[in-house]
Image (spheres, rainbow, N blue to C red):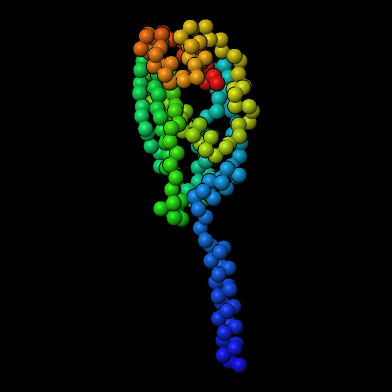
Amino acid sequence: MYVIISILNIYEVYIIMTEKKKLFTPKTLLEKIYDIQCEIGSVEKMDTNGGVPYKVLAYNDVNKAVREMFKKHRVCAIPSTTSHEKTGNLTEVVVGITLYNVDNPSDSMEFNGFVGYGVDNSDKGIGKAYSYAYKYLFLKLFNMNIGKDEESEDKVEVSITDEPLVKIKQSKNKSSEIKNQLESGGIKDGVTDEKQLGAALQSS
């Protein structure tokens, strides 16, 4: 009888431990990314005093929402740069990011090829380009909603009258066309209208 009771007790302990193991098995990174995509909220565009005639989506607002999800789901993000180039007042960067599962550091995923542009006559172009690139990396990776239609930009339309900028707006390969215009002198530092250039870069 004692032997039967002991066997039953061992079996009960086994069942309990198995269930606990299921409960505490760490999620994979893919599962965590899926959870973040499901949970992360919307971000709103804000009015700006920077002189542009439309609302903007700030990098800090996107980064804050993503950082909170990383903390909750124990995900670590390491940024990387594939390339960067400055011509005149235009800086272009291509960035990526590696996500690590903190509960299992060997479980990681890389995301590369996100392009960002920064237009500035001083030394701020590189920072603007990085902010632009990582903002859209996070938006697309985590399927984040923007308060209003992203493409509408909630803006007063900026009229693009400069012919080189019209070509950039209409081009399907903006990076290539930008380089062509820079090499041919179509875009000139301190001469090209920054608002028109910004509108050309953001056009779909």
Residue 42 appears in which quarter of the rendering? top right
What residue occupies the far bottom of the structure in this picture?
A: 1
Residue 147 appears in which quarter of the rendering? top right
Q: Which residue occupies 44% across, 51% down?
A: 107
Residue 51 vs residue 108, the one in the foreground: 108
Residue 188 vs residue 170, the one in the foreground: 170
Q: Which residue occupies 49% across, 16% down?
A: 171
Residue 184 vs residue 23, the one in the foreground: 184
46 in relation to 193, above or below:
below
Let me know if residue 16 appears in the view.
yes
What residue occupies the far right of the structure in this picture?
A: 148
Give how far across and how far down residue 21 sits, in percent: 53, 66
Q: Which residue occupies 57% across, 63% down?
A: 23
Say whether residue 43 is left or right of residue 200: right
Give how far across and how far down residue 158 sits, in percent: 56, 13
Let me know if residue 128 appears in the view.
no
Q: Which residue occupies 54% across, 34% down?
A: 139
54 in relation to 163, above or below:
below
Residue 4 vs residue 200, the one in the foreground: 4
Give how far across and how far down residue 50 sits, in percent: 51, 19
